[in-house]
Image: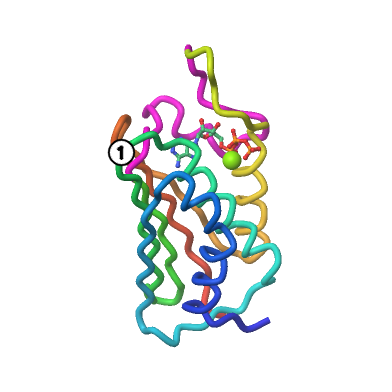
Amino acid sequence: ATIQVTTWLQAIVERMSPLLEKKNVAVHIDVDPEDLQINADETHMSNVIFNILENAVKYNDKASPLIKITAEVCQDAIRISILDNGEGIPEKYLDRVFEKFFRVPKGSLHDVKGYGLGLSYVKQVVEMHRGTITVRSIAGQETAFVIHLPLN
Ligand code: ATP
Ligand code: MG
């Protein structure tokens, strides 16, 4: 179906607002052009954004957690990027985070709960749409997931 990106992203963030408020997370959404549209399976693609945002909140214990979501046209694709200022992912694990059941090993006693399944689902859905997803990160500082979805 055709998705109006601005209202779609706002609705997902709204759906997460209890969690966002609990952890005092600020979310910025920037869509250019503002009336940008994509063609996608709305249920699955909403889950994609939701999973990435959920991680951005879960793996962030900064005093002022911040998430920036941007969507824009990039050649023949729509580029959606989700950047957070959380704990980051050490470089040696970056290429493994999309693996089923993979979680960055933590030495700590009180680990954040999860199955390591969210990002493998995310990647599957993006690839179902003939898109790509990449991740870059600076350990201790930030993580960004970038999705490219072909325009046609
Ligand atoms: P699930 O999503 O199944 O509840 P999960 O969050 O552990 O569990 P994924 O969403 O697949 O699984 O993420 C895999 C791992 O990648 C996480 O356990 C975490 O170590 C790391 N990770 C993912 N997103 C971030 C992020 N934004 N910042 C830091 N680490 C991240
Ligand atoms: Mg997850």
- Give yes or no for residue 144 being in the magenta stretch: no
Near mark 1 (Cα within 10 A), the count class, few <14, some 14-19 or many ≥20, is few
The quarter in which the N terminus is drawn is bottom right
| Residue at the image point whose x is 36% and y is 84% from the top | 33
Q: Secondary structure under badge 1?
A: loop
Out of 88 and 135, give the one closest to the viewer. 88
Left or right: where does residue 90 sit relative to residue 108? Answer: left
Q: What's the magenta region? A: 85-107
Q: Position of residue 115 (x, y in %)?
A: 67, 31
- Give yes or no for residue 101 being in the magenta stretch: yes
| Residue at the image point whose x is 56% and y is 62% from the top | 131
Which quadrant of the view contains residue 41?
Answer: bottom right
Extreme residue in the bottom direction: 35
Q: Is residue 87 above or below residue 129?
A: above
| Residue at the image point whose x is 59% and y is 44% from the top | 119
Out of 30 and 24, give the one closest to the viewer. 24
- List the residue tagged with mark 1: 63
Out of 30 and 135, give the one closest to the viewer. 30
Q: Position of residue 145 (x, y in %)?
A: 44, 51
Magenta: predominant secondary structure element?
loop
User: Under 8 Å from ligand 1: the CB of mark 1?
Assistant: no
Q: Position of residue 93 (x, y in %)?
A: 46, 27
Left or right: where does residue 120 sit relative to residue 35? Answer: right
